[in-house]
Amino acid sequence: MAIKKENEMPLFAKKIGEKERQKLKSLRKGKESVWSGLGMFGMVGWSVAVPTLLGTMLGIWLDKSEPQSFSWTLTFLAAGIFIGCLIAWFWVSKEDKEITKNNQDE
């Protein structure tokens, strides 16, 4: 009987170890998803805000130094928003591909 218990023990230990790894993995995933979600939200916001502000500042400077019949500020504001949205879209697309790849690997 002692031999049978020794043979069962490693199998039992392996099952317990696997369950523990699954629990730890799910706990880590839950914490990462909240923080990574907030990080992604911030990254998307900054990737739109920075080009918009830079475009606006460039437009204000051009309106003062090179006046035209149109507004440089509005032109570069729109260009900054467009470029920022493109940057955010590419970044989110890249992150989505990486998350999908990680989920498929698991």
Image: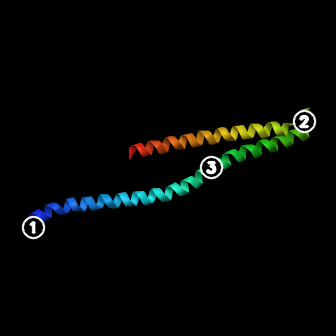
Which image quadrant: the N terminus?
Answer: bottom left
Q: Give the residue pinned by disc 1.
A: 2
In the picture, the disc for residue 69 is none
Circle 3: is it few (<14), some (14-19), or many (20+) Cα within 10 Å? Answer: some
Left/right of residue 44 with respect to residue 60 in the rendered view: left
Instruction: Of the two numbered discs 3 and 1 on the same chain, state the one appearing first in sequence.
Output: 1
Q: Give the residue pinned by disc 2.
A: 66
Q: Residue 34 in the image: x percent, y percent?
A: 54, 57
Q: Amino acid at mark 1?
A: Ala
- Secondary structure, mark 3, is helix
Circle 2: is it few (<14), some (14-19), or many (20+) Cα within 10 Å? Answer: few
Q: Residue furthest top?
A: 69
Instruction: Of the two numbered discs 1 and 2 on the same chain, state the one appearing first in sequence.
Output: 1
Q: Residue 95 in the image: x percent, y percent?
A: 53, 44
Instruction: Of the two numbered discs 2 and 3 on the same chain, state the one appearing first in sequence.
Output: 3
Number of callouts:
3
**Placement of 75 over or under 57, stated as above or below:** above
Q: CA distance from mark 2 to mark 3?
A: 34 Å
Q: Give the residue pinned by disc 3.
A: 43
Q: CA distance from mark 3 to mark 1?
A: 60 Å
Q: Residue 9 in the image: x percent, y percent?
A: 18, 63
Left/right of residue 39 with respect to residue 53 in the rendered view: left
At 28% from the left edge and 62% from the top edge, which residue is drawn?
16
